[in-house]
Image (cartoon, helix red, strand yellow):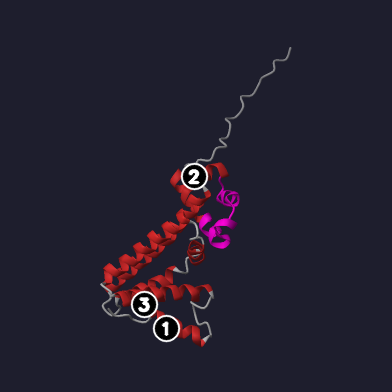
Amino acid sequence: MQRVTTATPPAATATRSDAPRKSADERRDEILDVAFLAFGTHGYEGASTEHIARAAGVSQPYLFRLFGTKKQLFLAAVERVHALTGAALEEGLAHAERDADRGPFEAMGHAYKAVMATPGLLRMQMQALAACSDPDVRAVVQEGFGRIVDRIGLSTGASSDDLAGFVARGMLLNVLAAMDVLYGDSGLPWAERLKEGCLQTATV
């Protein structure tokens, strides 16, 4: 009788990825990246948390576990607008300290223009303002905007007129960016004059 031998099967190949598992904070940042663009494009009412979750590669229940509600996710996106804006102004102030030829207002103006090129920032900023009929959104926008204005005032010692003029220039930069005439040569004399006026040196 012939003896049948059974070969020992090779060791099973591991199918689980060796890549480290992402933390909740990392997932939160990824979801917020997607939400930032989605809310900026479609607004608070128009954006879908189902779409945001799918685009971020997570389930919708997991999204709600991290952020609680759609409104809380939107408010997190609004707070990111303020964080990016504040960081740009701080960068401008730091540049003004290094460069005596550029005053704080001019340096902050150029830094703000640069950060406005961040994908989705302008639209998200405008969507935040548009959603201010909601008291929760309005409170977050007021707090963030006020914090930025206070920082500008304290760092420059500007008068009320100069402070209002600088903030008004920033809002005008938003309008120019929304019309796609802020970066490069627009070929429109009126737009180039407004840009020059917004970014010229301001004194206090």
Mark whose residue sits in front, 3 or 1: 3
Compared to 69, does 3 lie above or below? above
Image quadrant containing the C terminus: bottom left
| Between 72 and 37, the one nearer to me in the picture | 72
The image's mark for residue 68 is 2
Please tell me whether residue 43 belongs to the stretch shown in magenta. Answer: yes
Horizontally, residue 18 falls left or right of residue 152, namely right
**Pointer 3 residue:** 165
- Quadrant containing the N terminus in the rendered view: top right
| Proximity of marks 2 and 1: CB atoms separated by less than 8 Å | no
Q: CA distance from mark 2 to mark 1?
A: 44 Å
Q: Residue at x 35, y 74 (%)?
A: 164
Q: Chief secondary structure of the magenta span? A: helix
Q: Earlier in the sequence, mark 2 or mark 1?
A: 2
| Category of crowding for the residue at label 2, using alpha-carbon neighbours closer than 10 angstroms: few (below 14), some (14–19), many (at least 20) | few
- Residue marked by disc 1: 196
Per the model, the C-alpha gap separating discs 3 and 1 is: 14 Å
* Three-letter code, disc 1: Glu
Q: The residue tagged with tag 3: helix, strand or loop?
A: helix
Q: Magenta stretch?
A: 34-58
Could you tell me which secondary element the residue under label 2 belongs to? loop
Query: Who's the residue at 54% across and 58% down the image?
Result: 39
Q: Amino acid at mark 3?
A: Gly
Q: CA distance from mark 3 to mark 2?
A: 39 Å
Would residue 19 be visible to someone looking at this image?
no
- In terms of sequence position, does the residue under pointer 3 or pointer 2 come before the other? 2
What residue occupies the far right of the structure in this picture? 1
Categorize mark 3 by other alpha carbons within 10 Å: few (<14), some (14-19), many (20+).
some
State the image quarter where residue 87 is shown.
bottom left
- Dots 3 and 1: beta carbons under 8 Å? no
68 on left or right of 55:
left
Near-viewer residue (119 or 194): 194
